[in-house]
Amino acid sequence: MAGKVKEPASVVVKFYGNDCHYCQALKSEYESLEDEFEDALFFAFNIDDYPEAQKVLNFEGVPTICMMKVGNSKPKIRVMPEPQKPNGDTWYELSDIKAFIAKEK
């Protein structure tokens, strides 16, 4: 995201992998969030391009959703907790992602 966000903003990032069936199934639901949360920026990051991101941001596996507050000083980063009962198709429930974004922004 370096250089992409120039002003203070709430940024949601879905980390995904090309071979992750959950990630692929979650794609359209994740994209639908942009209409509901117009005051946030949405990105998708292919973990295959930079596997070290998992270690840097302290998460394991994909899909993973992060909320970042960027622009003023050091970014504030929150990783969405793993679901207690994962959805068999998309891993996360859309309602849980919405609640996470609303809480963190």
Image: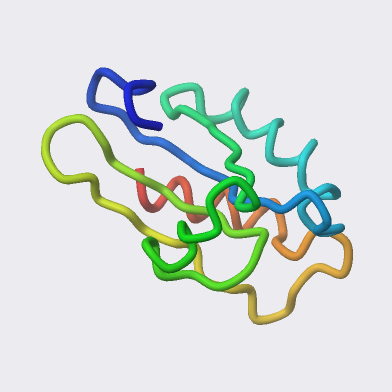
36 in relation to 49, above or below: above
Q: Quadrant of the C terminus?
A: top left
Q: Nearer the viewer, residue 75 or 35?
A: 75
Residue 15 picture location, percent across and down: 59, 51
Q: Is residue 66 above or below residue 85?
A: above
- On screen, residue 28 above or below 14: above
Residue drawn where x is 50% and y is 22% of the image: 38
Question: Seen in the image, is 50 located left or right of residue 16?
Answer: left
Residue 87: x, y in percent? 80, 68
Q: Residue at x 48, y 41 (%)?
A: 12
Q: Within the image, what quadrant is residue 61 found in?
A: bottom right
Q: Quadrant of the N terminus?
A: top left
Picture quadrant where residue 34 is located: top right
Residue 13: x %, y % from top left = 51, 43
Q: What is the tally of numbered marks visible in this picture? A: 0
Measured as percent of width and height from the top left, residue 98 is found at 57, 48
Residue at image point 46% right, 57% down: 53
